[in-house]
Amino acid sequence: VGLAAFPPRERWDDWVELDSRAWPRRVERRYMLVPTTCFNCESACGLLAYVDKDTLQVRKFEGNPEHPG
């Protein structure tokens, strides 16, 4: 699967995923993906913050495939 599993960069402003907590109903959630870094250690790994567009809360973090580190 590789990087194909990540949202394409041109869709980071408006990404749609199904809410797993609403299963078996198919409830869509809209996110904006915000590049950030982890501050846990000196490596500063690149992350993507999934920000819910309705509540503006961060819902999850994933590795940023565009980060050079």
Image (cartoon, rainbow, N blue to C red):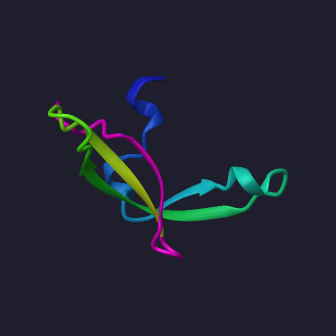
Q: From the viewer's perspective, tell me whether residue 40 is left or right of residue 20.
A: left
Queried whether the magenta region covers residue 59, the answer comes back as yes
Q: Residue sitting at 54 percent across and 65 percent down?
A: 30
Query: Which x, y percent locates residue 22?
Result: 77, 57
Please identify the quarter of the rendering in which residue 56 is found.
Answer: bottom left
Please identify the quarter of the rendering in which residue 42 is found.
Answer: top left
Q: Is residue 46 above or below residue 69?
A: below
Queried whether the magenta region covers residue 58, the answer comes back as yes
Q: Is residue 69 above or below residue 38?
A: above
Q: Quadrant of the C terminus?
A: top left
Q: Residue sitting at 27 percent across and 53 percent down?
A: 35
Q: Residue sitting at 48 percent across and 23 percent down?
A: 1
Query: Which x, y percent locates residue 46?
Result: 25, 40
Query: Which x, y percent locates residue 55?
Result: 52, 75
Residue closest to the far top: 1
Q: Overall secondary structure of the magenta stretch?
A: loop
Residue closest to the far front: 40
Q: Residue sitting at 38 percent across and 54 percent down?
A: 49
- The front one of 68 and 36 is 36
Query: Which x, y percent locates residue 68?
Result: 15, 33
Q: From the viewer's perspective, tell me whether residue 20 is left or right of residue 42.
A: right
Q: From the viewer's perspective, tell me whether residue 5 is left or right of residue 47.
A: right
Magenta residues? 53-69
- The front one of 40 and 44 is 40
